Image: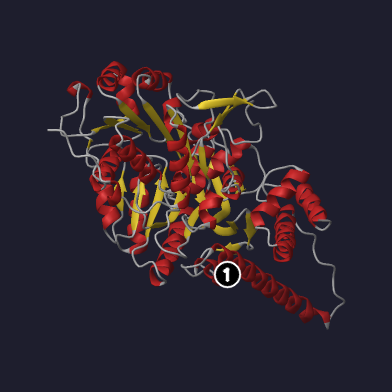
Amino acid sequence: MAPRLPALDTFPPLRAWQRKAMVEYLRRRTEDFTAVATPGAGKTTFALRIAAELLNDGTVEAVTVVAPTEHLKTQWAESAARVGIQLDAAFRNADLHSAADFHGAVVTYAQVGMAPQVHRRRTMTRRTLVILDEIHHAGDSRTWGDGVKAAFEPAVRRLMLTGTPFRSDDNPIPFVSYERGGDGLLRSRADSVYGYSDALREGVVRPVLFLAYSGETRWRTNAGEELAARLGEPMTQDLIAQAWRTALDPAGDWMPQVLRAADARLTVLRANGMPDAGGLVIASDQQVARSYAKLLEQVTGEKAAVVLSDDQGASARIATFAASEQRWLVAVRMVSEGVDIPRLAVGVYATSASTPLYFAQAIGRFVRARRPGETASVFLPSVPHLLGLASEMEAERDHVLGKPKDSDGFDDDLLERAQRDDQASGELEKRFAALSATAELDQVIFDGASFGTAAQAGTPEEEEYLGLPGLLTADQVSMLLTKRQAEQLAAQRRRAAQRTAEPAAAAPSAAPPPMSAAQRRVALRRQLNALVAARHHRTGQPHGKIHAELRRLCGGPPSAQATIEQLEERIATVQTL
């Protein structure tokens, strides 16, 4: 027996971007349509409304949804059932056809890649709408991409969805249109775009504060040499990778201190308007994830939920956590994309993955807004590449084919090598060993700007930032951060004046010692942020747009990564605007 058609009047009211995109879709009536919307904006609701419209007007008879993971299959099927569209999440390639009482099925890209002909036959049997969720995954391998293309070429309609429409490779994404720009490179073209900055302005997503932690790290290399470095300081990529790995070591002091700070932030959010707020630690591998869970239990006195992989039972554990008031969830990659846990408000980015794609997917888990004023806080290592990604949170990217690799970007292969133990053997087995790491709050990044001065973990200065109210608008966040930074600087000046006044009676005042390069960079960042804040108050332009304009005029990376010379040039430039 065929299922009933979905009733359009049962759908929740559409947001402005969803209505606009739907009108554009129905106006064009083209085979392919690509919708880009920031995580948390409501891509699933938009796609299901399109499916309902096409089922009701007879354009299609069936719907196939292709998702990245097994968990998302269940999530899609449940969301569709709530609006009267019945999708079979248990469909297997061996089944060949969906049961008659379903409108269609939900499958994974891996399923399609393994048996594209099965899905091609299903698509040809009935007029089909194919919804390709997070379509960039179709470029993950030639097998997936070729399989998706072969399986769904006969579809009457194809709707491509993504929150992160860019990749770090040159694998073309099936059914996505590319246009050649003035530089000769092909760029992906979307039919509807709803970016993070738009969603933030309309209150659809939360403002995200990035709390970057630096600290001293010491390790022993595979050659037996002991090295020390300060996380966040300029150094070679090999040293960054090794210092990063040392900081993330669960046996050191950096992770316990950062987890303690993150849990303190979670407590503040729960006490100030978000009583069910949850936290997520994103780990690099399963062994480390288990260790982080033990650390969290020591810090909080409560067991953390652990989701290690996309295996049997993982979806149930995620669903249980989402519906509970448990404080912490630890995951490897299972919760990096698409998984809907709206109460997640605090994150710890404790993974070695550093591509823009993965970073955006991970941060997307925390931005979904439920009520006005909710904010999200993400704790991360003070690594220049990550700081740059945090500063460019609002940047909109396209997938570019044939673009030369960015020599300024972080080489993930280096970090991967640093994460591996060499399997050397012999009389003296020499392996990488993390020796020690301490944490201190380096800076807070919000709206592309950097705030705050270095503060040791557990000090009142750190607590000033961890204790920011939980319910704030984006403008209030910016105002409070500016105020806290000004108070910090004033307190530092008072302490410095007291220190110099005491010996002044006994001896002539000595010239202040010269600042280190690190101290100069901090001072210049503060000066630049103060000037940007002043221009914001004069013109009403957002901080992020002013910083972006300075980067356009002066060149160089975001201020969190900028050199002393670049900061000085931007200070001189903003004074002339």
Residue at image point 31% right, 55% down: 304
Residue at image point 60% right, 66% down: 481
In front here: 172 or 525? Answer: 172
- Is residue 420 at all visible to an observer of this figure? no
On the image, the x and y values in percent for residue 375 come to 47, 61
In front here: 208 or 409? Answer: 208
On the image, the x and y values in percent for residue 216 come to 58, 52
The total number of labels drawn is: 1
Quarter of the rendering containing residue 284: top left
Q: Residue furthest right?
A: 508
Left or right of 352, for residue 73: left
On the image, the x and y values in percent for residue 158 come to 39, 29
Task: Answer few, some or many: residues within 10 Å of disc 1's Cα (few below 14, many 20 plus, some between 14 and 19).
Answer: some
Check the image and report above or below for 110 versus 258: above
Check the image and report above or below for 222 versus 461: above
In front here: 568 or 223? Answer: 568
